Amino acid sequence: MNKHKSLLAMLPLFLVLFIDGMGLGLLFPILNTIIIEPTAGFLPESTSTLVRDFYYGLTIGIFMICWFFGAAILGDLSDSIGRKKSLMICLIGAFLGYFISAIAINLHSFWILLLGRMIAGFTAGSQPIAQAAIVDVSLEEHKPRNIGLILLAISLGFVFGPIFGGLLSNSALVSWFNFTVPMYFAAGISLFNAFLLALTFEETLTNTRKALTIRWHHAVNIFISAFKHPAIARYSVVLLVMIFGWSNYFTFIPLYLLQTYHYTTMQNSFFLAVMGLGFSLGCGYVVGLFTKLCKFNNIVLVGLLITAAQVLIFLVSGVQWVMWVTTFIIGVSLSVAYSVLLTIFSNQVSKNEQGWVMGVTGSIMALCFGVTSVFTGLIAHVGAILPMILAFSGLLFSAILLFFIKAE
């Protein structure tokens, strides 16, 4: 297979990764506006701030919790029916999730919206399957290039998702643009990629299991196993606290900007896109530079401290251009810290445990992100600043924990 054909064969897989990266960034500013803003008309104007904040946290949290369970089940499924069919399930699920969410916005139904996010979350575990399939079809000399393209596809999705969400929901640009248009757009891309995958992608996993085994408890077992494994238990605690801090910032920054500075959906979208640019730079260049020069623990420690410091500067500055600079730096420092921390996890276990340990880190991320979003949504009515304080505290405390682990 020559270079051109190899890349063409993997195009649907890169689109899967792009759609995964795009999803949350596209939705957050829209969900923030329609649920939190009384004048948006999605919820009755009489809905209290407490209920609005809880609904917002629940909508995001339920997606991540369903992701937590769905990713483990889809992993089992891909071993039984193959990667192509599993990815088709993920893409059809993404299509249904976005389409139902658009219908829910039209009908002003929060519970239908929640159903759409549950379906999308449960079938959102396509990233590891797509990554594995790309590695399967990569020639040995092309693997470094293709792994770089994996990160690029996810990062581009994270950058363009908020931009699509902001532009396609702005009726000032085109009269018929509204909050449903980004949903239909994402649904259309997902459905198109499902057809593209069906027509052009050949199954890469030849030794599939004949017996179809779905273990509903598997996700919980994976999560618990992280804290029982002697080599990664302490790092798992660090990751858990780190995700607590990060999820508070990422989930509730649109809420903070809306309530404090009256940001529009487009302003919030471009704010997240700037963060995405930081992620792209961090994953694509900075992490490779520093891993050649510094010890891994030191990189994560400094990255977490820089991220916590930027959240604090964001809170106390009150100057908007400073906030935009800080979110870019947060994107760089957090992506570097997270990438290197995953490498540390990988280095703690044998070659035969690599799939397991990556599943563990994804499990911790998804469950903590989901539970934190619901919990903070319950108490965010106290003030939009509270999630930012929790973000700073979680990031700083995870750095302190890592320092003591490093010192042992």
Image (cartoon, rainbow, N blue to C red):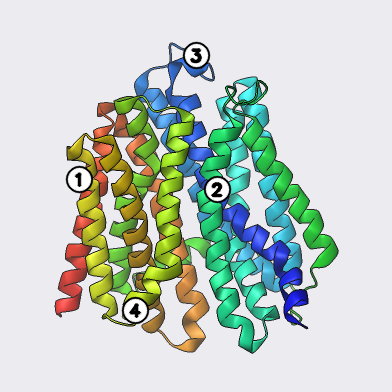
Q: Residue at x 57, y 22 (%)?
A: 172
Q: Is residue 104 above or below residue 314?
A: above
216 horizontally vs 315: left or right: right
Residue 313 is tagged as 1
| Rendered location of residue 86, percent (x, y) | 71, 63
Q: Crowding at label 3, few (<14), some or many (≥20) Cα neighbours within 10 Å? A: few
Name the quarter where the N terminus is drawn.
bottom right
Q: Which mark sits nearer the N-terminus, 3 or 2? A: 3
User: Is disc 3 in contact with disc 2, using a CB cutoff of under 8 Å?
Assistant: no
- Quarter location, residue 248: top left
- Quarter location, residue 99: top right
Q: Which residue is drawn at 28% across and 65% down?
A: 238
- Quarter location, residue 398: bottom left
Question: Which type of secondary structure does the marked residue at label 2 adopt?
Answer: helix
State how far apart marks 3 and 4 are (Cα): 52 Å
Q: Can you name the residue that lies furthest to the right here?
A: 199
Q: Three-letter amino acid code at disc 3?
A: Pro
Q: Residue at x 49, y 49 (%)?
A: 64
Q: Three-letter amino acid code at disc 4?
A: Thr
366 horizontally vs 308: left or right: right
Residue indicated by mark 4: 291
| Rendered location of residue 316, percent (x, y) | 17, 39
Q: Three-letter amino acid code at disc 1?
A: Ile
Q: Which mark sits nearer the N-terminus, 4 or 2? A: 2
State how far apart marks 3 and 2 are (Cα): 31 Å
Q: Crowding at label 1, few (<14), some or many (≥20) Cα neighbours within 10 Å? A: some
Front residue of 387 and 211:
387
State how far apart marks 1 and 2 are (Cα): 26 Å
Q: Which mark sits nearer the N-terminus, 4 or 1? A: 4
User: Is disc 1 in contact with disc 2, using a CB cutoff of under 8 Å?
Assistant: no
Q: Which residue is drawn at 43% across and 11% down?
A: 46
Residue 44 is tagged as 3
